[in-house]
Amino acid sequence: MSQSPPGVSRWIIGLLALTVVLGAGGGAVTGYLAGRAAVPAPTPAPVAPQPRPSPVATAAAIPAAAPTSYVNLLEQLMPAVVTVEARQGVLNRGVGIGTGFFYSEDGRILTNAHVLPENSSGEVRVTLSDGQRISAQILGRDVWGDVAVLQAEGGPFPALELAENLDLRVGEPVLAIGSPRNFRNTATSGIVSGLDRLIPRTVNTDSGPMAIPLRGLIQTDAAVNQGNSGGPLVTTDGRVIGINTAVQSNANDIGFALPIVDIIRRLPELESTGTVARGLLGVRYQLVDPELDSFAGTPYPYAVAVSAVMPDTTAEAAGVRAGDLIVAINGQALTRDFNLSHAIDGASVGEPLTLSVRRLGQLIDLQATLTPRPRAISTTPAGFPPS
């Protein structure tokens, strides 16, 4: 899927060329003093001093702070975190260094796909927290999702728990563990700074480059740097909530992690087939702002406006036209929490789709089968270097 640059201010840009705009607004508080200059104010009567609030009562209203020490927690987590070094070429030279972590005792490791270069060999060298170096094989690599699975030799190994169900909120304390700048066993602390973030990137495919962003990311101010890629972002109870993936290049303390709940959903396919098949709708579109636009006589207040249809794609086969408004997928209305990207990412390649479209004031249903994206080779976030 993709989208064209914004045309007018009422449209918000969609899938392909995305720009994050940070705005700041301000206000002013005004007041006045009024009185009668000709009539002097009466002298106020003395007021008896009032007792100050009890310091104990004031302190009781302050929420409990995060723990001041993570020593015991890190002693449990560190043995499951590894340094990953990919190899390349006849001389078997190291070309990529990042982080990974065991998620199963039989030696399976999660890391970022970009830690493993396109032409890296199947063998990866892994350094454990105690300095021991072992070999691992690349079991699967999902470039679109920027996730890879390795299989280490030996075992059993200590493994981290993946947070399958977690109501994550902004402000929760987190720890990032990894090998930034090749400093192994490094831990930093911070909070969840934001949720459902988007960063633009270019994905190089067999059919050429495609500008499809990473979505749904966790933002954190826990310090992450190059070499942290693939390492775990964990809560203070030791569960993994994300994989540290990228940082904002022109700012401080703005890092991003892939949410582990999305990875868990794709993990069985990645382990069994070595990749993840992802669908492509094949439209360029603009997002209709439901606060500015409305559709009289329809229960669908949210939509995307199609500006172009790519050839030989799901959308073309379904009969989608430029100017159509897509309002629902398989009968589920699009919303801010269930947008077009969520709908397509949640569908399987080969799955029949019903696209509900408003065209010339009429609501019609179009039928198609979801076609796969071209094979992804490598990915480069724009302005967000890998961590």
Image (tube, helix red, strand yellow):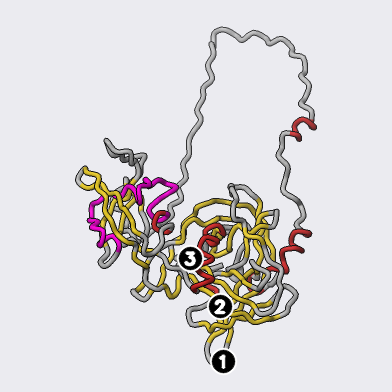
Residue carrying label 1: 91
User: Quadrant of residue 333 in the image?
Assistant: top left
- State left or right for residue 340 relative to residue 38: left
The residue under label 3 is which amino acid type? Gly
Give the image location of residue 52, x and y in percent. 77, 25
Q: How far, Cα to Cα, is label 1 from label 2?
A: 19 Å
Residue carrying label 2: 138
* Residue at 23 percent of width and 55 percent of height: 322
The quadrant of the picture occupied by the N terminus is bottom left
- Check whether the beta carbons of the residues at disc 1 and disc 2 lie within 8 A of each other: no
SS assignment at label 2: strand
Please check the rendered image and state whether residue 15 is part of the magenta-colored stretch, yes or no: no
The residue under label 1 is which amino acid type? Leu
Taking the view exactly as shown, the residue that stands out farthest to the bottom is 90
Residue carrying label 3: 145
- State left or right for residue 102 relative to residue 364: right
Q: How far, Cα to Cα, is label 2 from label 3?
A: 16 Å
